[in-house]
Amino acid sequence: MDKANNPQGAKPNFATGGKRSGPTSPKEAMLSWCRAVTKGYEGVEINNFGSSWGDGLAFCAMIHHFYPDSFDFSELKPENRRHNFELAFEKAEKLGNVAPLLDVEDLMRMKVPDWKCVFTQIQLYYRRFHLEEGKNAHVPPVGIIPKVAPPPAATAPADSEPLASQSTE
């Protein structure tokens, strides 16, 4: 190793670095947020983005956390998977303006949903609900694009031809 770059001659150990007290990856950070949002909901224990979401209760708990008056969570049953998925996705879209990326029929065919698909859906919820909860009102809901004024028209110098008539030869 070049001593000019490392005068003490010791190899740097980037793997150990400083100990982090929080999540160490975006996936873990998202799981932490999901756990916090669904804490206290009976029948919901989030350990991953696959099997933890298989009966639809975790989706319902998440939506219920943000819209507690929209439905009675205590009436939901894990065996009513289709109803749970449909309810969560419908409420998220209607009340939160978050379109479902997951298809209920696909979820019904699988006992354990594809974790990448669930993770992607949860990212949309996070962007919409976490930012809103953080009072970042300037951030539009997912799916809404703010209107932006068009850029001012470029003005050509008086001695030049209009762009459309210029030759590219």
Image: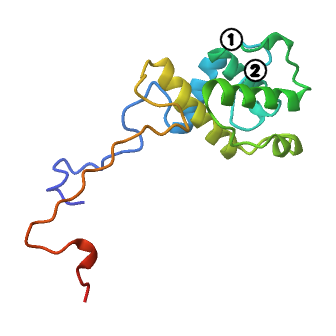
Find residue 154 and report its image quarter.
Answer: bottom left
Above or below, comparing residue 73 to residue 151 in the picture: above
Q: Is residue 3 above or below residue 43?
A: below
- Reading the chain from its start, which is encountered first: label 2 or label 1? 2
Q: How many marks?
A: 2
The type of residue carrying mark 1 is Pro
Residue at 37% x, 41% y: name it. 148
Structural crowding at the residue carrying mark 2, measured as other residues with C-alpha within 10 Å and reported as few (<14), some (14–19) or many (≥20): many
Residue placed most toward the observer, 121 or 159: 159
Spot occupied by residue 87 in the image (x, y as percentages of width and height): 79, 26
In the rendered image, which residue does mark 1 sit on?
68
- Secondary structure under badge 2? loop
**Residue that appears at 22% across and 51% down:** 9
Return the residue at label 2.
44
Mark 1 neighbour class, 10 Å CA radius: few under 14, some 14 to 19, many 20 or more: few
- Image quadrant for the N terminus? bottom left
Whether residues under marks 2 and 1 lie with C-beta atoms below 8 angstroms apart, the answer is no
Foreground disc of the pair 2, 1:
1
- In the figure, residue 129 lies in which quadrant? top right
Instruction: Give the percent coordinates (x, y) of residue 146.
Output: 43, 37
- Residue 154 is left or right of residue 70, and the answer is left
Q: Secondary structure at mark 1?
A: loop
Q: Is residue 144 left or right of residue 81?
A: left
Coordinates of residue 7 in the picture (x, y in percent):
16, 50
For the C terminus, the image quarter is bottom left
In the displayed orientation, state which residue is furthest to the right. 79
